[in-house]
Amino acid sequence: MSRPSPVFRSSRSDQAGCARGRPIGSILMENGTLRPSAAVQALTESRRSGAPLPQVLISEDLASPDAVLEAQALHYGAMRLHRDQHPPDPDLAGLIPPETCLRHAVLPWRWLGDTLVLATSRPESFETATLALPESCGKVAMALALESEIQAEIAARHGDAMARRAETQVPAEESCRDMNTLTPLRAVLGIGFAAACLSLLLVRPGLFFSLAAGAAVLTLCFAQAMKIAAFLAGRRPPRPATGAPGYIPAMSILVPLFREESIARDLLRRLARLEYPRACLEVLLILEARDATTRAALSGVSLPPWMRVVEVPDGPVTTKPRALNYALRFARGEIVGIYDAEDSPASDQLLRVAGHFGRAPPEVACLQGILDFYNPKANWLSRCFTIEYATWFRILLPGLARLGFAVPLGGTTVFFRRDALEKVGGWDAHNVTEDADLGIRLARHGYVTELLPIVTREEANNRFWPWIRQRSRWLKGYMITWAVHMRSPARLWRDLGAWKFLGVQLIFLTAILQFLLAPTLWAFWLALAGWEPPVFAYLGDTQTRVLFWGFLGAEAVSLLIGVAAVSRSPHGGLLPWVPTLFLYFPLGTVAAYKAAWEMIFRPFFWDKTAHGKSAPDHAGAEIPADEPP
């Protein structure tokens, strides 16, 4: 093309000469789009948050994206492009990698003679974006297009390829994606171990049971010692962060959704309560291409300007971490947070996250919040689940972090520095507990996770079989995560150091083995009915008494930790239910054997938890109580 096509001219080209260089707010007021009072409001917010004025105008819904872009075109004297009227040249698709285009909000559009027209939705950073172009491009002209149109074009051209890269971006040696590959070595080890166990069971069943019971007792001792240490460590005040306050970074919240039609509207209402400068916030609702039900539920909802939908192309795996990896490419925030579909976060949560990151040293790459439930009184199962969550998030995780261990993350209310997240490769798309795995990988790369007393409430899974299915996915993920990181114990030791290496064994192995070996411990209680477990043949009277006192001591520790956890939560009415946990945890054993079977035959199967099945206990129950800052 030797001459500019008419569609490249601004619809207000007659005004371009006199409007060039004039403030964008003045242009919008002059054409009647923006009221003077709204202009003052936008300027004030721009100075407060540090966000560009155009972004403030759009995010606060003071002017439409089209009107703002038109004013920017006049201000910069640039061409205004429309994807439907004059589509981009597909031959330029490979000129800049799609991830780079998304990061800078640019897209090579067309050639005009020997000049490349580079579309952008952020003209203030156009010069920086041109550095991504090959030197052979020569002359470059800036044009303006909506960011939604740029992203839509990139998704149409490169979506499938980016989705494939999202599946494999974690290095192979740190990923579980070959877990379902039967290598000769794995076959020999698996068959050998199974044959040895079966032979011992058939030939010496008493010895087999005694060895299993011994391993269970040893695991129990380690688990209770870890609980006591975490409880004592959690009583120490956290290390104060240093640095400048008032940090308001751009923040992207990723919300993966899959078949969540029943709670989609509640989710939007809860997210709207978040207090954060809208110009510095974006919420990405992540949908799978095949998820027509959630798409239909959202189709009738008018999303605010700071929320948008990202659709993930189909692929061989359909998992939450794959969706997160794909959507991260479309996010612009330097802080990235994760919420689940049923979450109801505290309104000041993002401000506290930003403030903590602003004061924390650079190695603090991740902040984990507290998860709680808004339906603890639904039934006995939800009460026990709430006590368990209080124990994990209010006692154990803070204590483990202060002990200096690597922290297995929860899947929601977790926030990252984006540069650290990208350096470790994001999430392992095949791991069904991508959160726990990512916590260990962050530690292996030298980063630190801190616990922050910010609360998100969600729905307790309080139906028997769905609870088993959810717990089996979590335990399978723990098995996979431990197996992946223990492929090379020596390397894990070098990466983490001796202390954190010990922590990985304590956290993961005790969780796995306690559930798998629990039946051998239950058998000891049958001794009260007169049946003698085979291990008694190897124990004297003194050792037997010590063993039983040890069991009682372990129950006392669990009771103490449970009471302390509930006392630190807003659910003091659950204290009478703490002693009933001994009936609750055997359900985990059922889940553990389901997880072990899937570990062998279906390692990547994501057993989806359905939400929206249990309403909050009462109006306002989903709003978290205040926590100490």
Image (spheres, rainbow, N blue to C red):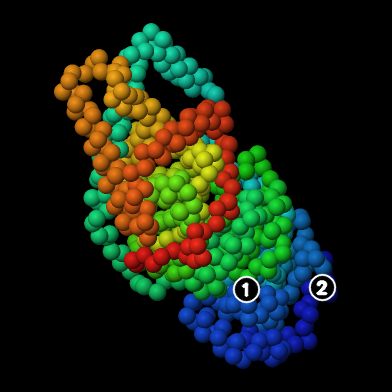
At mark 2, the secondary structure is: helix
Q: Identify residue type, mark 1.
A: Pro
Pointer 1: residues within 10 angstroms few (<14), some, or many (20+)? many
Badge 2 is on which residue?
Answer: 7
Residue 65: quarter of image: bottom right
**Relative side of 337 to 605, left or right:** left
Percent coordinates x, y for residue 246 in the rendering: 40, 74
Mark 1 and mark 2: Cα distance apart in space: 19 Å
Task: Tell me the quarter of the picture where residue 201 sits.
Answer: top left
The percent position of residue 516, horizontal first and vertical second, equals 41, 29
Seen in the picture, residue 495 relative to 336 is either above or below; the reply is above
Q: Whole-percent x and y of residue 115? A: 73, 67
The picture places residue 608, in percent across and down from the top left corner, at 58, 43
Q: Is residue 346 above or below residue 463?
A: below
Residue name at image x 79 percent, y 63 percent: 87
On the question of residue 324 being in view, the answer is yes
Residue pictured at 21% horizontal, 32% vertical: 549
